[in-house]
Image: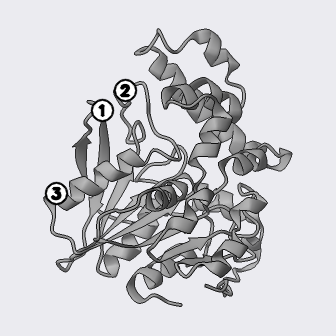
Amino acid sequence: MPLIKSAYNPIFPFKNGHFSTIYSSKFRPTPKLAQERERLELIDGDFMDVDWSFSKKQSQKVAILLHGLEGNAQRTYIVGQAKILVENGWNVAAVNFRGCSGEPNLSYQSYNAGKTDDLEAVINLILNKNKYSEIALVGFSLGGNLLLKYLGERGTFPKEIKKAVSISTPVSLRGSLESLNEFSNWVYRKSFLIKLREKYRMKMKDFPEKMTALDYKKITSLLAFDNLYTAPAHGFKDAYDYYEKNSSLQFIPNINIPVYLLNAENDSFLSAACYPEQLASKMKNLHLEIPKYGGHVGFHQTNAQYYSEARTVAFLNEGIY
């Protein structure tokens, strides 16, 4: 498909990528939305929590929402997207990855950008308990990479999965890490690192044979965290092996359902490889929009409705292109 010409043109402050990113993450008022929690028991003895929201009218459609690094189902970008979907006839299952629902998970492993078996477990839960005729996958940042990898690495998946939306997605994980390591991104890097170090410190109590105070002191960068925890916990040689095997860019050509990828040009989390224009021009299923503005998950239109939220609903309900 040809690249989508973007109509997104926000008011002045939101033309700045850092302003868009920080305002949307820290200052946008969280929309009001009812959520009901369901716990999913995993086959390895661990658990994940899913927060449900329901359309007022009985619906045969459900959207599975996947958050980003150190997010959860209560983050404003998840709630905002869920609210608009519910208002447009969708039920919503907002996933909390392992250890992200406010309660530490039980196993040594947690989540990562390519852990598609956990997404598969959520999909199976929904299909086994409900009679939905249509499932949509909607992912943000790390969650976007996860869903693209899921769709592209499998020869088959449930026929109910009809479309997917991926927003502000680092389809090249190593490239995104290198972008985050730039000086201008120090505030985001620091914020992620504080949260990840705290999770490591808490998990040390349960797994002292695998996690040590000495290694904890060595976690001074995102790369170090992935080398000392993400890679060994999930079966990779090192951080670069993890990035290489889980970057979704290599899986996108195999996707056989319509996918909408929305990545802002001024998203400082993304590298050049995260804008697969040549790939989109050759693929009939990949709809790629690259607005000039938007930052990282910061497509402000009004506080009540973001551009990305409206585009997601339009893509899922109408096809828009």
Farthest-out residue, front: 155
Taking the spot 40% from the left edge, 61% from the top edge, the residue there is: 155
Give the mark nearer the N terminus: 3 vs 1.
1
Quadrant housing residue 172: bottom right
For marks 2 and 1, the one nearer the N-term is 1
Find residue 311 and report its horizontal and vertical position in percent.
52, 80
Label whose residue precedes the other's in the sequence (3 or 2): 2
What's the amino acid at mark 3? Asn
Q: Nearer the viewer, residue 232 or 94?
A: 232
Answer above or below: position of 257 versus 156: below
> Residue sitting at 73 percent across and 60 percent down?
273
Measured Cα–Cα span from mark 3 to mark 2: 25 Å
Q: Callout 1 environment at 10 Å: few (<14), some (14 to 19), or many (20+)? A: some
Name which residue type carries label 1: Asp
Q: Is residue 280 left or right of residue 61?
A: right
Name the residue tied to disc 2: 107
Mark 2 element type: loop
Q: Name the residue under label 1.
A: 46
Q: Is residue 12 visible?
A: yes
Front disc: 3 or 2: 3
Label 3: which secondary element: helix
Q: Can residue 30 be seen in this view?
A: no
Give the side of residue 183 with respect to residue 277, left or right. right
Q: Residue 156, percent across and down?
A: 35, 62
Q: What element carries label 1?
A: loop
Q: Mark 3 points at which residue?
A: 128
Q: Residue 190, position in %: x, y? A: 70, 38
Q: Where, by quadrant of the figure, is residue 217 drawn?
A: top right
Q: Residue 212 carries which label?
A: none
Measure the C-alpha gap from mark 3 to mark 1: 19 Å
Q: Which amino acid does label 2 sit on?
A: Ser
- Please report contact status of discs 2 and 1: CB closer than 8 Å, yes or no: yes
